[in-house]
């Protein structure tokens, strides 16, 4: 009997006796490897830990001044606009893109709603629908240029940001519609600013909308075919197309939905500030990217949880309010947020080694 045949018989005999005949090395063995794997499977875990730690630290430093229903819900009210826009930004970044026009779409949609109501006398609900349609249309143009013309998302949305911003100023003539006029003649525009109390905590319709939006999008991304297609396109569009995913339709749906969500954010912005101002919310694009990055969504696409973007927005809100109550200079907030952004990207690169 040859040596090869004898080794094969020995292997079969050992297998039949239930003995271990071979095992692969587990590269995740050890505490560090297990943590790395856990963060890879649950990308929103890191921002959640940071958020809880920040709340505890500021709570210990400030006591009841910070740990009060008013302060906690104030944070939610302050981040509602960023949270809604960050949800839109998250969808685009999950496809390995980026949308620099989200803030401009938000503001222009709000201007459309206000101007259609007061300049043309259009009924408020129809004016709101027109604003939502405009936001969706701009998103569709972005999606078409990215998916069909194959232009880089950064370039497309950078150009669209400038175009929409200029159109916004030209169309509105830099005119602000005052909150008193809106309250008296078109209060429905301020719908998202409607407040209600629960046990001493004050909420707005905008906060409720933000939370519901995150829940719905989180479910859609996790439990629907569309959500799986979004992740697949972000991970590898060529492989996704070979697997039967319609990359063009997926990207179009993502950018159109992003534009629609930004238009809703414009409606919520009117409720938040009370007026229609063409100069408001100019930093929403940067703030949304900040929330998404801190929230653990990979800028390389295909990995992350939209829940993380909410955690990222809340982290910024907690640091902003906490430092303000401590009497610290506002620049410390920017410094700490900058450090968090760099740290978040570094952690993302470390976690990605699991799948490397």
Image (spheres, grey):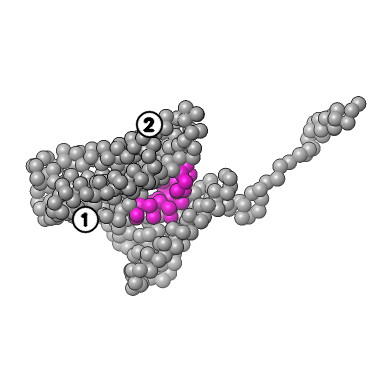
Residue at far bottom of view: 327
The answer to whether residue 199 is seen in the rendering is no
Label 1: how many residues lie within 10 Å, few (<14), some (14-19) or many (20+)? some
Image position, residue 320 (x, y; %): 35, 64
Residue 279, labelled with which disc?
A: 1
The answer to whether residue 301 is seen in the rendering is yes
Horizontal side, residue 137 vs residue 332: left or right: left
- Residue beneath label 2, please? 249
Q: Residue at x 48, y 59 (%)?
A: 343
Location of residue 16 (image quadrant): top right
Residue 199 higher or lower than 210, as above or below? below
Q: Residue at x 32, y 63 (%)?
A: 71
| Secondary structure under the numbered disc 2 in the rendered image | helix
Q: Residue at x 66, y 50 (%)?
A: 29
Image position, residue 142 (x, y; %): 32, 39
Residue 304 within the magenta-colored segment of the rendering: yes
């Amino acid at each position: 009997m040859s040596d090869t045949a004898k080794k094969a018989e020995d292997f079969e005999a050992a297998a039949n006796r239930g003995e271990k005949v071979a095992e692969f090395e587990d590269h995740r063995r050890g505490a560090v490897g297990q943590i790395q794997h856990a963060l890879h499977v649950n990308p929103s875990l890191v921002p959640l830990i940071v958020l809880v730690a920040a709340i505890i630290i500021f709570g210990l430093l400030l006591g009841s001044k910070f740990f009060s229903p008013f302060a906690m819900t104030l944070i939610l009210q302050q981040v509602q606009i960023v949270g809604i826009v960050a949800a839109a930004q998250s969808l685009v970044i999950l496809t390995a893109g980026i949308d620099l026009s989200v803030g401009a779409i938000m503001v222009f949609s709000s201007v459309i709603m206000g101007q259609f109501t007061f300049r043309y006398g259009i009924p408020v609900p129809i004016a709101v629908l027109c604003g939502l349609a405009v936001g969706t249309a701009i998103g569709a143009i972005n999606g078409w240029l990215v998916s069909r013309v194959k232009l880089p998302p950064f370039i497309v949305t950078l150009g669209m940001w400038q175009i929409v911003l200029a159109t916004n100023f030209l169309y509105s003539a830099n005119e602000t519609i005052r909150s008193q006029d809106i309250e008296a003649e078109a209060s429905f525009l301020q719908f998202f600013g409607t407040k209600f109390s629960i046990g001493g905590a004050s909420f707005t319709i905008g906060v409720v909308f933000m939370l519901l939006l995150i829940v719905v999008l989180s479910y859609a991304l996790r439990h629907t075919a569309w959500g799986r297609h979004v992740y697949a396109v972000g991970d590898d569009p060529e492989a996704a197309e070979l697997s039967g995913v319609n990359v063009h339709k997926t990207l179009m749906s993502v950018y159109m939905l992003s534009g629609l969500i930004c238009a809703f954010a414009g409606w919520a912005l009117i409720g938040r500030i009370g007026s229609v101002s063409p100069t408001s919310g100019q930093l929403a694009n940067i703030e949304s990217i900040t929330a998404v990055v801190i929230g653990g969504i990979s800028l390389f696409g295909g990995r992350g949880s939209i829940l993380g973007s909410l955690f990222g927005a809340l982290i910024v809100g907690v640091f902003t309010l906490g430092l303000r109550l401590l009497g610290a200079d506002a620049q410390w907030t920017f410094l700490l947020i900058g450090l968090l952004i760099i740290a978040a990207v570094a952690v993302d690169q470390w976690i990605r080694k699991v799948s490397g």
